[in-house]
Amino acid sequence: MGLPSSKRNNQRQWSLLDIVTAAFFGIVLLFFILLFTPLGDSMAASGRQTLLLSTASDPRQRQRLVTLVESGQHLQPIEYCPADAVAHMPCEDPRRNSQLSREMNFYRERHCPLPEETPLCLIPPPSGYKISVPWPESLHKIWHANMPYNKIADRKGHQGWMKREGDYFTFPGGGTMFPGGAGQYIEKLSQYIPLNGGFLRTALDMGCGVASFGGTLLSQGILALSFAPRDSHKSQIQFALERGVPAFVAMLGTRRLPFPASSFDLMHCSRCLIPFTAYNATYFIEVDRLLRPGGYLVISGPPVQWPKQDKEWADLQAVARALCYELIAVDGNTVIWKKPVGDSCLPSQNEFGLELCDESVPPSEAWYYKLKKCVTRPSSVKGDNALGTIPKWPERLTKVPSRAIAMKNGLDVFEADARRWARRVAYYRDSLNLELKSPAVRNVMDMNAFFGGFAAALASESVWVMNVIPARKPLTLDVVYDRGLIGVYHDWCEPFSTYPRTYDFIHVSGIESLIKRSDSSKSRCSLVDLMVEMDRILRPEGKVLIRDTPEVLDKVARMAHAVRWSSTIHDKEPESHGREKILVATKPLWKMPSNSH
């Protein structure tokens, strides 16, 4: 027998009310879970990562996001990358590059993804990141949390490279070939090489470890740029830069290194393991291109008087003889040669088949330029730039180099440029109140350096400047080196060869010119990608200064918001002509939400 109809309805009503109530409480509970628990964080993070991955896998989705950021319609900041991207270098990505040919270490050179192949996101700092130890203390210790890689300390601690001590890594100054410390090693070299008195200024340290050699040379007034590939030891170049020592990531493989001819007064290899005599001495020839006439080459470690490497050692000496290098000394496992001044005495016959380059080979082009098997004639390099004929440091900073005079109106352009930058830097300090010295600033980059005028105006401060000469602009990097400054060629439509968080201050005059086609007003790449790259290489609490027209800076200010910088726009110094304004931006120290892997 069934229930009376009124009771059946009542039961149905209660059931409906129960469902509504349960649904309401369920929604509230879900809201609390999403808002206040790790599960919520993790779901939100995975949603963000899905969006990120879609910008990498779907070029149209990525382009839509870039367009929204450019137009100022993307009101949220750009998302952060996954936590495992803390040390990401787009052009030196081992996962990507390991598929490439190993011949001549091609796979360890720069190989950049297209912008549409990369997620549009901001590289996060590692968990526990602290503002870097200021210079000069940073030369001797850095925060472990900023680079929590113990591999070098574990493997090389007994050689005095570095040690873990509490919250710090410390650097006793050792190296594989100088466990007694770089100071002791440099003292040995100074018996044979004039390391004091400003005779030598620019040096290249090849395969540099944690750059204790370059760090120690600074006290002699010698500015050493160190390079090494992205390596199995984990981040030696990142350690060098965190210490405040000039360094960047590079590999001597199939291409010229990104420097002009006759750049370095001293070139140094301490167990760098570069096979100088392989491939018909191609790598020795590249060292010869870069070494200034009258400059010094130092090689320590294999194959110099090394067990079971008699043939390699004999070959190395034979190449040096063929190029008429003067043997200064062989001291234990260290050899020192001096490059001759004047055209090479290459005889027509030598066992390596070395020949002089003909005039069709430009001596100073070096951006993705294949290595040549011919020797650069010093006479093909404009101007008189041998050691002994150029002024000593610091006079060479301000004296007009002969390679500047060789350019059209070079003397007048150089002198006007020097006056302009002295005036501008004084305005940055006095009117914009920018701290352009340690402890606030140590590693500085000028993205569009021309003659190095900005760096020259900072030369009395305890900072160093990476002068970048855009590869599509006039190749004036030789003038930068003749002044006793350092830098590299680079195209800003690609990521730079450095680790994240390695510069305190980035300066750029004419940002839009870095990405424009020379033959039209169209861009070769996106300003959004360029600013995301600037954010990658800038340290938290670091500053960016951009000079450009008001229209360009309005665009830049919108994008600065998207990369989470706070920015202000200022008038230029009153003495300057033109319509420029100045944008100054600061990158905050932001932490990733938890569980955002």
Image (spheres, rainbow, N blue to C red):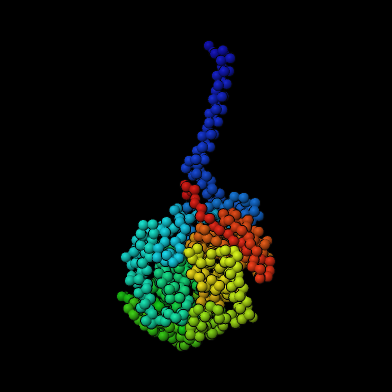
Q: How many marks?
A: 0
Outermost residue, top side: 1
x then y, percent, for residue 426:
58, 69
- State whether residue 475 is above or below residue 566: below
Image-based side of 516 in relation to 322, left or right: right
Q: Nearer the viewer, residue 573 or 64?
A: 573
* Nearest to the observer: residue 413 or residue 151: 413
Q: Is residue 465 visible?
A: yes
In the rendered image of this protein, does residue 91 appear above or below residue 284?
above
Residue 366 picture quarter: bottom right
Q: x, y percentage for residue 240? A: 44, 66
Left/right of residue 416 with respect to residue 391 in the rendered view: right
Residue 208 visible in the current orientation: no
Which residue is drawn at the image coordinates 53% and 11% (left, top)? 1
Q: Residue drawn 47% across and 52% down?
A: 83
In the foreground, 61 or 541? 541
> Farthest residue in the left direction?
307
Q: x, y percentage for residue 149?
A: 40, 59
Looking at the image, which residue is at 45% across and 78% down? 266
Q: Is residue 171 left or right of residue 423?
A: left
